[in-house]
Amino acid sequence: MIKTIKQWLQAAADVAMPRVCPVCRQALDGDEKWLCRRCLAKLPRTRYEETDFNTMEQHFAGKVPIERATAYFFYEKGAPYASILHDIKYHGMPLMGQWLAARAVGDMASSHFFDRIDVVTAVPLHRSKLAHRGYNQSEYLARGIARALGVQYVEALRAVRPHSTQTHKGALERWQNIQGNYALNNQAQQLAGQHILLVDDVITTGSTLTACAQLLKGINGVSVSVFTLAAARLE
């Protein structure tokens, strides 16, 4: 088989600086993108989108009315697949998240989860964190989905004040920590009557997503669905 110039260049780059799978740490071959085939095949999928009123959707019940909610795979602290989120969020690899989010659209096609989405938006990052990190990983995910669906990505929300880390907080503390953190952008009212997909990297208690969804539901006639790349084992 004749290799393209791009494949030859990738092969040369892999020799000089081998790319490795973030899950198993084995070298990737020239045809593998971000994850090796074996780890991608064993991705611990939630498959929430295949169940009505699934575990993730139950977290929003009684708090904010949403259409559907799903996450692509399960996140467990310290587990090999947790490194995917860490690399996307902290190690300058948001393009891996964008690629995985776009894959999720194809993998979930039979569930019709994305069929009626009109526009995609992301949980915003405060400018102080954006300056420190250099990017909003959730925006990359949202743009990957929007591109795969052929719909528009819109910055409907903004972070109006920073908040301390949520990592070691319980559900009530998380909810108190994010109160007043977000607001609608000026152009958000132009989304009236549309079905908005709200995107974040991971859901734990759902407090951040609930706060953002409540704001979006304040737009006239809007319906909201939620997608996260990963989900903690929700109870």
Image (cartoon, grey):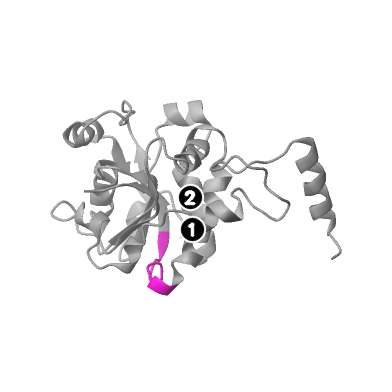
* Image-based side of 29 in relation to 2, left or right: left
Q: CA distance from mark 1 to mark 2?
A: 6 Å
Q: Circle 2 sits in a helix, a strand or a loop, which is it?
A: helix
From this viewpoint, which residue is outermost toward the left? 62
Name the spot of residue 223 as percent of width and height, x first: 28, 63
User: Callout 1 environment at 10 Å: few (<14), some (14 to 19), or many (20+)?
Assistant: many
Task: Write down the quadrant of residue 177 in the picture.
Answer: top left
**What residue did someone put label 1 on?**
145
Dot 1 falls on a residue whose secondary structure is helix
- Magenta segment, which residues? 110-119
User: Circle 2: is it few (<14), some (14-19), or many (20+) Cα within 10 Å?
Assistant: many
In this view, 104 is above or below 168: below
Q: Residue at x 39, y 66 (%)?
A: 117
Mark 1: amino acid: Ile
Q: Mark 2 belongs to which amino acid?
A: Leu
Most frequent secondary structure within the magenta stretch = loop
**Left or right: 34, with 9 as reference point:** left
Magenta stretch contains residue 113: yes
Q: Is residue 146 visible?
A: no
**In front: 164, or 205?**
205
Residue 141's disc is 2
Q: Is residue 197 magenta?
A: no
From the top left corner, tell me how far across and down residue 129 is, in percent. 43, 29
State how many labels appear.
Answer: 2
Residue 204 in the image: x percent, y percent?
A: 29, 42
Q: Quadrant of the N terminus?
A: bottom right
For residue 134, side relative to residue 199 (left or right): right
Residue 111 in sight in this render:
yes
Residue drawn at the location 19% of the way across and 31% of the way down: 173
Callouts 1 and 2 close, C-beta under 8 Å: yes
Residue 187, percent across and down?
38, 51
